[in-house]
Amino acid sequence: MMIQIANPIYDSVFKYLMEDERIAKTLLSALLKKEVVAVETRRNEYTNGVRDNISMFRIDFGAHVKEPDGTIRLVLIELQKTWLETETLRFRQYLGAQYSNPENVPSENNKDGYAIPMVAIYLLGHRVGDINVPVLYVKHKAYDYDGNVVTDGIPDPFVESLIHDSIIVQIPLLHGQVNNRLEKVLSVFDQSQKNGSDRHVLNVNDTPFDDDDDMQYLLRRLLMAAANAQLRQEMNVEDEYFKALEDRDTALMMKDKKLAEQAEQLEQNKAELEQNKAELEQNKAELEQNKA
């Protein structure tokens, strides 16, 4: 059956979605490909980037992840979502804040002062270069001088304190293909399902999720968001902001184009002046020759 759910590409809807612990565990478990048994939002969660040039939404989680051997490990999740292309410096600044935050170095049973391992997750509303996969996993490995992978003693808390893995999701490449658990969860972000007359909602077929309680729960949350008048208004505000942003960018592009045309015309005029000067010099030389 086709249903209309709120579009989680909007910051307001995404925040409403991730406030639910069960949904946060569902999404993070799918992304990490490990069971997240508990999750909590950390201080300074739900922060938006500076609104003058980009929209960047960030949530910090403390996730208790179940490893293959059954142990539970605390992992810091730095989740960032953005609609528009933005400079990597903005992402690096947020990561730097996490590395320098003393709260991420627990004091209890941690005499060596190791930091909590971190995973950076980026939900991007744009593509990254020529990379054609919707979800990219960037993981670090340790090597010796000869380029051989070092496995003994890895992972090590000292190493994990100084480096992190990343997961990059390119939302424009989510085209309704559901081949695994992650693609199933991310299908609610697929912008090809946007309603033709209302970009605030997605038209989703919920039949493939009949046997999945977590996905049914997630869809119900987005159904409630679609019916929430306050969230609708907040989506309108985001639309107005991006319309103003697009108008500004268009004006800047037109201005740059005009300046480029003027510069080209000046270069052309300069070349013509140089040519006229050369012709005058030639005429002067001919007159001198005739006079002689």
Image: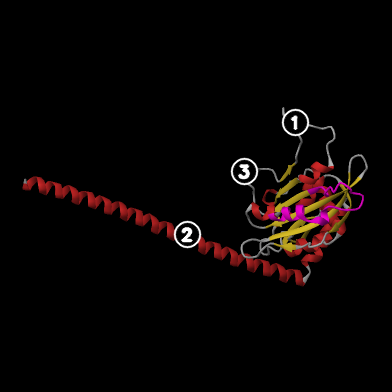
Which residue ends up furthest to the front in the rendered image? Answer: 111
Q: Quick one: label 1, few (<14), some, or many (20+) residues within 10 Å?
A: few
Q: Amino acid at mark 2?
A: Asp
Dot in front, 1 or 2:
1
Q: Does 62 sit above or below residue 150?
A: below
Q: Residue at label 3? A: 130
Instruction: Judge whether residue 215 can be spotted in this image.
Output: no
Q: Amino acid at mark 1?
A: Asp
Instruction: Judge whether residue 35 can be spotted in this image.
Output: yes
Secondary element under disc 2, as helix, strand or loop, is helix
Dot in front, 2 or 3:
2
Reading the chain from its start, which is encountered first: label 3 or label 1?
Answer: 3
In the image shown, does 115 or 92 lie closer to the viewer? 115
Asked if residue 103 is among those painted magenta in the image, a careful observer would answer yes
Across and down, in percent, residue 232 comes to 73, 69
User: At 63% from the left edge and 67% from the top edge, which residue is drawn?
Assistant: 241
Q: Label 1, label 2: how many angstroms apart (C-alpha)? A: 50 Å
Q: Quadrant of residue 53?
A: bottom right
In the image shown, does 75 or 137 lie closer to the viewer? 75
Q: Label 3, label 1: how many angstroms apart (C-alpha)? A: 31 Å
Dot in front, 3 or 1:
1
Across and down, in percent, residue 164 comes to 76, 45
The boundaries of the magenta stretch are 93-118
Q: Determine whether label 2 and label 3 are within 8 Å by CB.
A: no
User: At 79% from the left edge and 57% from the top edge, which residue is drawn?
Assistant: 60
Q: Residue at label 2? A: 256
Q: Amino acid at mark 3?
A: Asp
In the image shown, does 4 or 292 lie closer to the viewer? 292
User: At 60% from the left edge and 66% from the top edge, which residue is drawn?
Assistant: 243
The circle drawn on residue 144 is: 1
Q: Does 70 sit above or below residue 194?
A: above
